[in-house]
Image (cartoon, grey):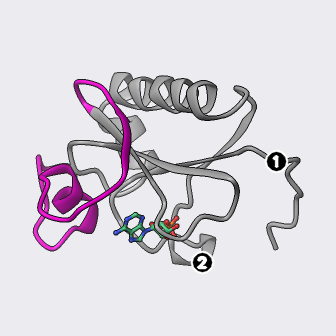
Amino acid sequence: MTSEAAADCLFCKIVAGQVPADVVASSDRVIAFRDISPKAPVHVLVVPKEHHGDVSVLAAADPSLLADLVALADEVATELSDGQYRLIFNSGPRAGQSVFHVHAHVISGAKLGWTPA
Ligand code: AMP
């Protein structure tokens, strides 16, 4: 889905200020807020303000918005950590996606393991 905002979308409600979030950064078209259930010392979600379902939908619809999202993720990792980070887009339920508004997880602040499955 690529509309401006989607009904019953948690992250659209955060963007609209209807659900509270710990916002750490924002730009014209992207917002970053702390994950409510952090998996690392720094765990921030970076989200386009427009609704797009997943990263492949966003890449096809608006590559420059995806680039803006990656740029804000890099800024957040530099501001809150040491600029070294993992960027994760879960795409699809079996990959762990639970919120169907594209978001990058910025994971940082520790030596990271690698056990995705
Ligand atoms: P995913 O499972 O990749 O779709 O990621 C969704 C993420 O959203 C999870 O890591 C949740 O902990 C996080 N999350 C769910 N609700 C909220 C919320 N209200 N504020 C911040 N993060 C949230």
The numbered mark at residue 94 is: 2
**Where is ligand 1, by quadrant?**
bottom left
Name the dominant secondary structure of the magenta segment.
loop
Residue 107 image offset from top left, x and y in percent: 66, 48
Q: Residue at x 49, y 23 (%)?
A: 71
Mark 2 surroundings: few (<14), some (14-19) or many (≥20) residues within 10 A: few
Is the residue indicated by label 1 positioned so its CB lies within 8 Å of ligand 1?
no
Residue 55 image offset from top left, x and y in percent: 45, 47
Q: Are marks 1 and 2 in contact (CB under 8 Å)?
A: no
The numbered mark at residue 110 is: 1
Position of residue 102 relative to residue 81, above or below, is below
Find numbered disc 2 in the image and state the secondary structure of the residue it sits on: helix
Mark 1 or 2, closer to the camera:
1
Find numbered disc 1 in the image and state the secondary structure of the residue it sits on: loop
Q: Is residue 3 left or right of residue 104?
A: left
Q: Is residue 99 left or right of residue 76?
A: left
Q: Which residues are magenta?
A: 1-29
Residue 36 image offset from top left, x and y in percent: 46, 67
